Amino acid sequence: MFDDISLLPPDPILGLLGRFRADPRDGKIDLGVGVYQDEEGRTPVMRAVQAAESMLLASQTTKTYQGIAGDPEYNERMLAMLLGEGHVALRDSRIRGVQTPGGCGALRIGAEVIRRARPDARVWVSTPTWANHIPLIGGSGLQILEYPYYDPATRGVDFDAMMSALEKVPAGDVVLLHGCCHNPTGADLTLEQWRELTALTLRVGFTPYIDTAYQGLADGVEEDVAGMRHMMSAVPECVLAASCSKNFGIYRERAGGVYFLARDALRAEAVLSNAMSAARQIYSMPPAHGASIVSLILSDAALRADWLTELGDVRSRIAGMRELLASSLEGNAAGTDFSFVTRQKGMFSFLGITPAQVTRLREEFGVYMLDSTRINVAGITPRNIAPLAAALHAVLADTTA
Ligand code: LMR
């Protein structure tokens, strides 16, 4: 059976985490996988999460199956958080979906349902996009194509190029968008650009597929999804994949959800039945614990307020580290202006250095980032900024790299 099976390369993101963990050097710096770290370089359990877990432990009476769609209350509360109470899609009962094992489960079930609905639909993803989007969505059998997004010259979105490319997408195809905190570039659309994109979506007739994994990590829980909410109030159909890994810090608990906006309530019900059937075929039903935590936090006023406060602290720490990195790199020998880092949103930025510099940073200085030069800004701390800046200054000064 396995005689001819070949050894695959490690995952580009999680494989780097393995290499970082295996590195014995004391001063190593992890700017790789997208996981929040506090000032001490720890990934803490949020206060509200700890409190919710204690309450669940005290009150839980059973571990019986929850059902294919997960906890209905969780799905309801997630939709209210994602879309805002009273959103037209909720009022008209046009949106239904399932709790999933993390954002990855959500993205895959979304793709499976799209393939069932329209097997020849192609999915257009931004250049670049999160490395796992392509295997996760492509693994369902859908063809993946790319549209221009990031402009290395301006370090922002090349909105004109994006709009001209999407203008030519055939009706019935699917366009994958990042709800906020674009992974890997940190370059987001403005609210005005979301409005223009919504108008184009309506004119051209493709279906938006929105991945939102960082709500609350840029400007605020409401602010970050204003563009996506606008789009979902205007378009007839949409797929929305969400993750609670980052904004609740419950990475290993695998809590997410995928929600389908359809033309009417009856169609939404039919789409839901297909999402449930796809989930049953792949993993049967989602794990309960992470979703129970989220549901409790979102339904309890005190827990919710504390979660929002701590999420605000996370956001300010990341923004502070963006400022610190940019100022620490001023006057570098390459003459590069790194102030763009302060304009980007969420956990990530592209440094835009050379592959040789990325390798040298890892091998000589123990600084780990993705080969694409994506850094996790949340891996920077007041303690590691000095060695990090020194390492970056050293490689930027090396004109041979
Ligand atoms: C990342 O982009 O680093 C995170 O979303 C973690 C992952 O699964 O890749």
Image: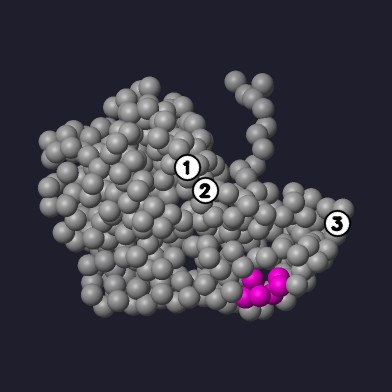
Left or right placement of residue 281 versus residue 379 in this view: left
Query: Which amino acid lies under the numbered mark 3 shown in the image of this protein?
Result: Thr
Q: Are marks 1 and 3 in contact (CB under 8 Å)?
A: no
Magenta part of the chain: 324-330
What label sits on residue 399 in the rendered view?
3
- The spot of residue 224 in percent (x, y) is 37, 62
User: Could you tell which of marks 2 and 3 lies nearer the N-terminus?
Assistant: 2
Alpha carbon separation for disc pair 2 and 1: 6 Å
Q: Which residue is mark 2?
A: 158
Q: Are marks 2 and 1 in contact (CB under 8 Å)?
A: yes
Q: Main secondary structure of the magenta part?
A: helix
Task: Look at the numbered disc 3 and say if its residue's Cβ is closer than 8 Å to ligand 1.
Answer: no
Q: Residues within 10 Å of mark 1 (few under 14, many from 20)?
A: some
Please tell me in which quadrant of the rendered image residue 137 appears: top left
Q: In the displayed structure, would residue 397 be above or below residue 41?
A: above
Left or right placement of residue 136 versus residue 63 in this view: right
Element class at badge 2: loop
Please tell me in which quadrant of the rendered image residue 281 appears: top left
Left or right placement of residue 227 versus residue 315 in this view: left
Query: Which residue is found at the position 63% from the left and 52% from the top?
Result: 153
Query: Which residue is found at the position 77% from the left and 59% from the top?
Result: 361
Alpha carbon separation for disc pair 1 and 3: 33 Å
What label sits on residue 162 in the rendered view?
1
Disc nearest the viewer among 2 and 3: 2
Alpha carbon separation for disc pair 2 and 3: 29 Å
